[in-house]
Image (spheres, rainbow, N blue to C red):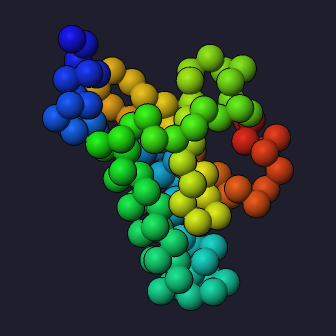
Amino acid sequence: MTILEINLRIGKMKVTFTDPAAERMRDIHKFYKCNVSEIIADKIIAKILDAAKILEVSPWAGQEEFYLKHLGHDHRTIIAGNYKIIYRIEVEEVLITDVFDARQDPAKMVR
């Protein structure tokens, strides 16, 4: 049995936001706080964080991200409102690499 299989059985995958993903979350919050309201900004971020928390126990919940296949890192994605949470599964953790506004052109995801 691999470490990944053991972690999946006991539900202890660590979920980590990379620096660029954390920066994207700050940008999303700032945008909604300045243009709509702080309450809405907080709700959007909470929705994204709630979806990311699901990955602790179900890291395979998301589908493969077609637009990032060429990178060869098996990126996956789950949806939280208008946002795609882009992640990959490492040995002992789920690494969130981006939070992407799904209303944008998916070609912008490839950076």
Where residue 41 sits: x, y (%)?
Answer: 52, 77
Q: Is residue 59 visible?
A: yes
Q: Quadrant of residue 34?
A: bottom right
1 over 16 or under it: above or below? above
Seen at 46% across and 77% down, the residue is 43
The N terminus, quarter of image: top left
36 over 51 or under it: above or below? below
**Is residue 30 rendered to the left or right of residue 55?**
right
Where residue 74 sits: x, y (%)?
Answer: 56, 24
Q: State the residue in front, 11 or 100.
A: 11
The C terminus, quarter of image: top right
Q: State the residue in front, 48 or 32.
A: 48
Seen at 52% across and 41% down, the residue is 62
Outermost residue toward the left in this view: 10
Q: State the residue in front, 57 or 29.
A: 57
Where residue 64 sits: x, y (%)?
Answer: 60, 32
**Is residue 23 rendered to the left or right of residue 7?**
right
Seen at 83% across and 50% down, the residue is 105
Q: Is residue 24 visible?
A: no
Q: State the residue in front, 53 or 95.
A: 53
Seen at 33% across and 31% down, the residue is 93
**Is residue 14 rendered to the left or right of residue 79?**
left
62 over 35 or under it: above or below? above
